Structure formats: structure tokens, C-alpha cells
Image: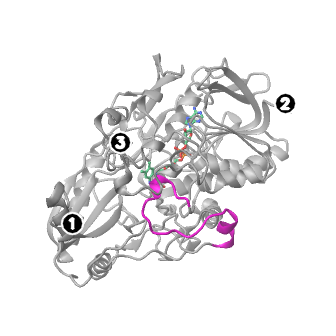
């Protein structure tokens, strides 16, 4: 084995890449992880983690001359002075929006695992059987029982807090003690229980450690301090990120080599061997190119960049991209529809003054079309429910007035909001392609993204408005506002598809083990592999699929089959 040859290569060090590295190195494979962004060490490289509001140069706001370097994220709440060190500038990787798309990317070791909201609901057979039952996309090649043990495997390691709620839509897992609902969320839950027997409000299952187990202490991680500043990076390792958990764990095996500031350009396919032999890379600083070799390759560059790398991996055998015999690579992309927001106020519960602090929210699992088709739209939505106590007058003034206002606030009504998280339908025309001419500054083709909402998404939004206005009304809430936030595709950070799993090589790219049908030593286990999107957050499922695929890959490798 020379310095450029490994047993395995993992492309990308984010949520799914971290899991690939952990599993492969633990199973004894000499593994090279290649990350295009900068190095970032837990817990020392979190520059804003302990800053107080007045210690930020611009008091947390991002001034115009900086914000304009991040146009694809300008509509996102992430664009603050505390999180900006972890966000990729557009000029680092330009792309073409055939239809408006906010592409939000990390640019460091850990990827977006540093920035995520940590909601970790399992998917159920209502999701894995969805396409077959409702007649869209293709049938998933797996069912809940295939992935359930891997959900447990991941949950135990990362630490997921939650209740065992016994609900079909979001199966129970290996939970640490839950966070608590606020008083108004409990009040809303009681009302929902009375009026809607088929709807359930629960505390969201969340990847924050409420009581560390031995496995978390071994990772050097401690209890969540309820600082509610997770997206700055947590020095306590209170929430799961690849930086605090999987990557240091993989390093401890002695089997991991981490290469940063290095872009994977494409995968090298050997015609004679009939398999991939390595990856071509570009050093971001020197622009020098190289080839690294390995027996197996896990592509975890996040859904869109994984599509880009495979489309860019052309050879005589695969002139349209690696494994792309059926022409489906880059198609059937989907995302989550986060456009709906319903807000309300409550004049009761005035004896409770504070909403407290916790790193999560309440959650209502999908109730529409769960057991059967009930509506004129396909699928449904989950809902995040959050709340706070308003204070008047608000502290928006300046100088002395601001000081007076802050010193003399009066608690106002309770505020509650419901945020829709809608499933979208993957369609053949929802796709990404490579621009034949335009390249980014490192010489990679620019991605053309053509994904948008459709009539189903509009119907789902209207249904959400109607149902939540009614639910809040029945709970006695006032000042109900229905808001179309107009969040664009991508803005929810859950882009999926393009390299979907399926049973049939004619209609899918990957088999049930996330292996390219036509190039068996290449595995895709990030969002690109998803056949449909469910309405639950997807990252727990990426991690479980990754661990499952890594186990399979190592067994196949040891058996000499790949
Ligand atoms: C604000 C926010 C809130 C979120 N909330 C939730 C939530 O509550 N629940 C949930 O499930 N998900 C949530 N997500 C989404 C979650 O972060 C992503 O689903 C997850 O990080 C995707 O994992 P990944 O491994 O596919 O990609 P990433 O974590 O994005 O990592 C990909 C890595 O690959 C690297 N890379 C890209 N291209 C190349 C290349 N050519 N060569 C080498 N390296 C490359 C990138 O630099 C990056 O480090 C949220 C995301 C954000 C930003």
C-alpha cells in the first residue's frame, strides 16, 4: 500500500461521511477521508461559541458587504455573525439556478453537522411504503425492519433525547430523557388530545445529550447545557456533530487519514477491472491534481455535490456519468416544503413568566393520508411547534429608550407557532445537470439546478393553513396569522435524490445496500440516495443507511466480492 492507496475512501466529512469513516475504520479498513473545506477541530475551532451579544463586532447582524458574499443563503435565518464561519461563500462554488434554489453548504470538516437543528425522528413504513402505495417515484428496496437495528446503532452512539410515544408515524428509538414542553405547548397538546384523536403533539426527538451514557463519555462529550447556541459549535459536545463524535472516534482507531482543502473532482473507473479504482482530486491552494486509490469508495459529499461528482465521472464505459446507464442520474430530486407558518397568541397561562431555554421544540408527526388517501393531495406534513412569552415594549429602540425599555418590560401574551415540514414528490423533470461550459474557480463544472414546487405542494400548504388555524382556534388562541414564508427549495437544507435507491437497475441508480447497480464498489449514502423524502428530517436516516451500507461493504470486501 503506497501513500496514495487505501482500503476505503470517504468523500466528504459531514453527517454521513463521518459515519462512513467511523464504521469503516472500526472494522479495520485503512480509510482516507477527503474534505473540500478547511480543517476544524473540536472543541477549539468554534470562534463564536462563548461570545456574548455585545462582543460581536456587528452585534450579531451581518453587514451588507459581507452578506453579499452569501447570496444563496440571504433568505436563511442561519446568516448571522455567530454562524457565518461555518457557511460556504457562493464564490467558492458557483452554481446555476434554472429555478430559484438556496444551496446551503458547510465549508469545513463536519460539513453541516455543525449547523443542523438536530431533529431526529425515525422514518416508518408509512414512508418506505409511500411511493408504492401512492404511486409515485419507485418502490424503496428496503422497509423499516431493514433499517430499524441501524437506527438503534446510530441513536445509541450520537445520543438522542425523546419520549417513547408509541406512534406509528415516528417509531420509538433508543432515547435519553426528553426535554420538556413549555406550558403553552402542554396546553395545546391537551386541546389536540380532546379534539383530534388521530393527531399527537410530542417533544421532538433531538440529538442533544440530556444524560450522558458511558459511550458518550468515552467520546469526551457531556450533557447539553441548554445554552441554545448549538449552531456556533458546542465545546461540551452536548449535541451530535461529526466533529465532536464520529471523526475523533475514527481517528482513535489509527486507521483514518484526513485530507482537507482537497476537492474530489471525479471517480476513476477502470474499464478492465470493471470497477472504480480511486478518485481524482484538486488541492484548493496549489490547484495540483492527484489520484488516490482505494478498494471501495463512499460518496458522502452531500446530495447535490454527490450528484455533481458522479455526473463528472465520465469514462468510455460511462459517458454520461458513473453508473448512469439508464440516464436517471441527477433526476427525481426532491426537498421539503417549509413554506407554511401559522402564529397565534394566548391570553391565558399568565402565571408562567418564562419560556425557559432548550435546544429543541415540540413536534406533531404527519397525520394526513397516513393510513389511507384522505385528501386531494399526496402525502402530508409534519409540524414543528414552538413558543415563547412576549415582552412589551420590545427592545428595538436605541440609546436611553432602549435601556429604559429593557429595564421595564411587561410580560405579554404567550406566542405559539406551527411550522410546516411538507413532503414533496420526486419527479423526473426535477433534476440537476452539469453546465457544459461554466466552471467554478477550481475547474469543476457548475451545477444547473432545476427543482421547484408543484400543485401538490400548494394544496398541502393550504391544508396546513386550514388545519392549524382550526386547531389553534379550538385551543382558544387569538390573533391567528397564516404566513407563506416563501422559503425556496433548498432553504430547508433537506435536498435529496438524483442517485435514488430502488430494486430495478432500469429505474434506479443504487440497490438496497446503497451500491451503484453498475459499479459495485461505489456506495452513496447521503441525501442523494433517497427515493422519496418523507416529511421527517432526513439526517438520522442518512446516518443509519451509511452504517448499514458500511457493514455490507466490509463483508463483501472480506468475501472478495467487490
Ligand atoms: C440550519 C440547519 C438546520 C438543519 N436541521 C436539521 C434537522 O433538524 N434534522 C436533520 O435531520 N437535518 C437537519 N439539517 C440538514 C443536515 O445538516 C444535513 O441533512 C446533513 O448535514 C447532510 O449530511 P451530508 O453528509 O449529506 O452532508 P454535509 O453534512 O453537508 O457534508 C458534506 C461534506 O462534503 C464536503 N464536500 C462537498 N463536495 C465535496 C467534494 N467535491 N470533495 C470533497 N468534499 C466535498 C462538504 O464540504 C461537506 O463538509 C439542517 C441543516 C441546517 C444547515
Magenta stretch, residue numbers? 213-235
Label 2 sits on residue: 2
Q: Nearer the viewer, residue 531 or 539?
A: 539
Who's the residue at 33% across and 36% down the image?
67
Mark 3, Cα crowd under 10 Å, few <14 / some 14-19 / many 20+, is many
Image marks 1 and 2: residues in contact by CB distance under 8 Å: no
Q: Is residue 295 above or below residue 122?
A: above
Label 1 sits on residue: 406
**Visible residue check, residue 427:** yes
Q: Position of residue 83 (x, y in %)?
A: 42, 48
Who's the residue at 14% across and 60% down the image?
401
Q: Is residue 112 above or below residue 310?
A: below
Q: Position of residue 525 (x, y in %)?
A: 60, 45
Q: Quadrant of residue 220?
A: bottom right
Question: Looking at the figure, which quarter contains the N terminus?
Answer: top right
Q: Main secondary structure of the magenta part?
A: loop
Amino acid at each position: 500500500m503506497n501513500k496514495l492507496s487505501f482500503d476505503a475512501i470517504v468523500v466528504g466529512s459531514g453527517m454521513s461521511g463521518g459515519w462512513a469513516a467511523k464504521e469503516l475504520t472500526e472494522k479495520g479498513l485503512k480509510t482516507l477521508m477527503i474534505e473540500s473545506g478547511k480543517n476544524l477541530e473540536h472543541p477549539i475551532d468554534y470562534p463564536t461559541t462563548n461570545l456574548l451579544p455585545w462582543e460581536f463586532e456587528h452585534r450579531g447582524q451581518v453587514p451588507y458587504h459581507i452578506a453579499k458574499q452569501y447570496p444563496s443563503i440571504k433568505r436563511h435565518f442561519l446568516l448571522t455573525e455567530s454562524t457565518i464561519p461555518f457557511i460556504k461563500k457562493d464564490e467558492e462554488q458557483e452554481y446555476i439556478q434554472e429555478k430559484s434554489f438556496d444551496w446551503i453548504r458547510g465549508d469545513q470538516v463536519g460539513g453541516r453537522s455543525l449547523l443542523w437543528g438536530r431533529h431526529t425522528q425515525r422514518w416508518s413504513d408509512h414512508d418506505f411504503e409511500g411511493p408504492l402505495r401512492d404511486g409515485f417515484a419507485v418502490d424503496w428496496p428496503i422497509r423499516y425492519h431493514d433499517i430499524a437495528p441501524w437506527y438503534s446503532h446510530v441513536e445509541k452512539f450520537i445520543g438522542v433525547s425523546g419520549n417513547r410515544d408509541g406512534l406509528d408515524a415516528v417509531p420509538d428509538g433508543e432515547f435519553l430523557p426528553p426535554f420538556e414542553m413549555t406550558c403553552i405547548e402542554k396546553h395545546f397538546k391537551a386541546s389536540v388530545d380532546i379534539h383530534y384523536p388521530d393527531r399527537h403533539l410530542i417533544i421532538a426527538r433531538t440529538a442533544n445529550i440530556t444524560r450522558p451514557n458511558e459511550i458518550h463519555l468515552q467520546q469526551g462529550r457531556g450533557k447539553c447545557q441548554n445554552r441554545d447556541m448549538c449552531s456556533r459549535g458546542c465545546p461540551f459536545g452536548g449535541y451530535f456533530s461529526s466533529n465532536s463524535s464520529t471523526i475523533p472516534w475514527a481517528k482513535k482507531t489509527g486507521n483514518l487519514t484526513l485530507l482537507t482543502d482537497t476537492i474530489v473532482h471525479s471517480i476513476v473507473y477502470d474499464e478492465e477491472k470493471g470497477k472504480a479504482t480511486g478518485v481524482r482530486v484538486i488541492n484548493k491552494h496549489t490547484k495540483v491534481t492527484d489520484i488516490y486509490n482505494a478498494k471501495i469508495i463512499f460518496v458522502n459529499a452531500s446530495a447535490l455535490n454527490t450528484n455533481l461528482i458522479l455526473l463528472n465521472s465520465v469514462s468510455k464505459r460511462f459517458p454520461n456519468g458513473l453508473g448512469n446507464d439508464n440516464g436517471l442520474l441527477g433526476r427525481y430530486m426532491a426537498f421539503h416544503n417549509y413554506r407554511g407558518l401559522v402564529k397565534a397568541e394566548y391570553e391565558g397561562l399568565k402565571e408562567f413568566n418564562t419560556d425557559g431555554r432548550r435546544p429543541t421544540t415540540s413536534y406533531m408527526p404527519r397525520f394526513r393520508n397516513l393510513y389511507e388517501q384522505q385528501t386531494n393531495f399526496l402525502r402530508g406534513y409534519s409540524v414543528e411547534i414552538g413558543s415563547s412569552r412576549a415582552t412589551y415594549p420590545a427592545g428595538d429602540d436605541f440609546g436611553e429608550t432602549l435601556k429604559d425599555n429593557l429595564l421595564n418590560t411587561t410580560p405579554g401574551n404567550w406566542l405559539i407557532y406551527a411550522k410546516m415540514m411538507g413532503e414533496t414528490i420526486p419527479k423526473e423533470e426535477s433534476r440537476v445537470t452539469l453546465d457544459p461550459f461554466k466552471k467554478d474557480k477550481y475547474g469543476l463544472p457548475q451545477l444547473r439546478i432545476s427543482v421547484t414546487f408543484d400543485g401538490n405542494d400548494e394544496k398541502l400548504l393550504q391544508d396546513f393553513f386550514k388545519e392549524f388555524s382550526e386547531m389553534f382556534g379550538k385551543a382558544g388562541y387569538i390573533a391567528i396569522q397564516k404566513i407563506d414564508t416563501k422559503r425556496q427549495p433548498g432553504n430547508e437544507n433537506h435536498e435529496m435524490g438524483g442517485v435514488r435507491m430502488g430494486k430495478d437497475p432500469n429505474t434506479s441508480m443504487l440497490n438496497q445496500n446503497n451500491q451503484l447497480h453498475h459499479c459495485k464498489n461505489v456506495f452513496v449514502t447521503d441525501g442523494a440516495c433517497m427515493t422519496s423524502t418523507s416529511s421527517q428530517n432526513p439526517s438520522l436516516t442518512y446516518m443509519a443507511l451509511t452504517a448499514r451500507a458500511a457493514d455490507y461493504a466490509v463483508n463483501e470486501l472480506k468475501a472478495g466480492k467487490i
